[in-house]
Structure formats: C-alpha cells, structure tokens
Amino acid sequence: MKVIDNKQLRFDPALLSSLEQGETFAVTKKDNLVAFLVPAYPMASKRPGSLAKGEFIVPADFNDPSPDIEADFYGS
C-alpha cells in the first residue's frame, strides 16, 4: 500500500491507472490518515484450483443424516 498526500489526488493522473491495476493507497492530510483508496472490483485471483487435490477424501455418506444429531433435534 502506498501512502499519498491529499494534494496528490488532484495532480497525479497515474493514480487511476494504479488503482485499475489493483494498487491501494492510504490518503493523508498533514500526516494524518484520512482515507483508504481501494480498487472498486477485486483483482482476479491468481490462486490455482485443486490445491489440496488428493489430500483428503469426502466420504460418500457425507450428506446422509446422522442418527445421533437427528435424535438431538427431533427426539426419539
């Protein structure tokens, strides 16, 4: 995150380009934090899918009702 003075908001058109590329800014006025500028839309994730592939197996009965839990909620 870059720190910018409020005066730079008016004089630096490159800020918009930086925001479009995902840069965030902390805006200060006389060394006091005033606001944060963040991109309107989050950047596309670069995290690949299937990171934990093969690390665990979801059991076939994962969504089946549990008799113990059913008894707690509905009684027996």
Image (cartoon, rainbow, N blue to C red):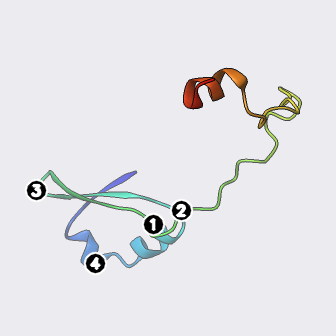
In this figure, what is the number of numbered marks? 4
Q: Is residue 53 above or below residue 6?
A: above
The first of marks 4 and 2 along the sequence is: 4
Image x and y of residue 4, in percent? 28, 59
**Marks 2 and 3: in contact by CB < 8 Å?**
no
Image x and y of residue 20, in percent? 51, 71
Give the secondary structure at mark 3.
loop
Q: CA distance from mark 4 to mark 2?
A: 25 Å
Give the secondary structure at mark 1.
loop
Give the secondary structure at mark 2.
loop
**Marks 4 and 3: in contact by CB < 8 Å?**
no
**Marks 2 and 4: in contact by CB < 8 Å?**
no
- What residue did someone put label 3 on? 30
Q: Is residue 51 left or right of residue 1?
A: right
Tag in front: 1 or 3? 1
Q: CA distance from mark 1 to mark 2?
A: 7 Å
- Residue shown at the point (86%, 28%) measured from the top left: 57
Residue 72 badge? none
- What residue did someone put label 2 on? 42
Give the secondary structure at mark 4.
helix
**Marks 2 and 1: in contact by CB < 8 Å?**
yes
Tag in front: 4 or 1? 1
Name the residue nearer the viewer: 66 or 55: 66
Q: Amino acid at mark 3?
A: Lys
Q: Is residue 21 above or below residue 58?
A: below
Residue 39 badge? 1
**Marks 3 and 1: in contact by CB < 8 Å?**
no
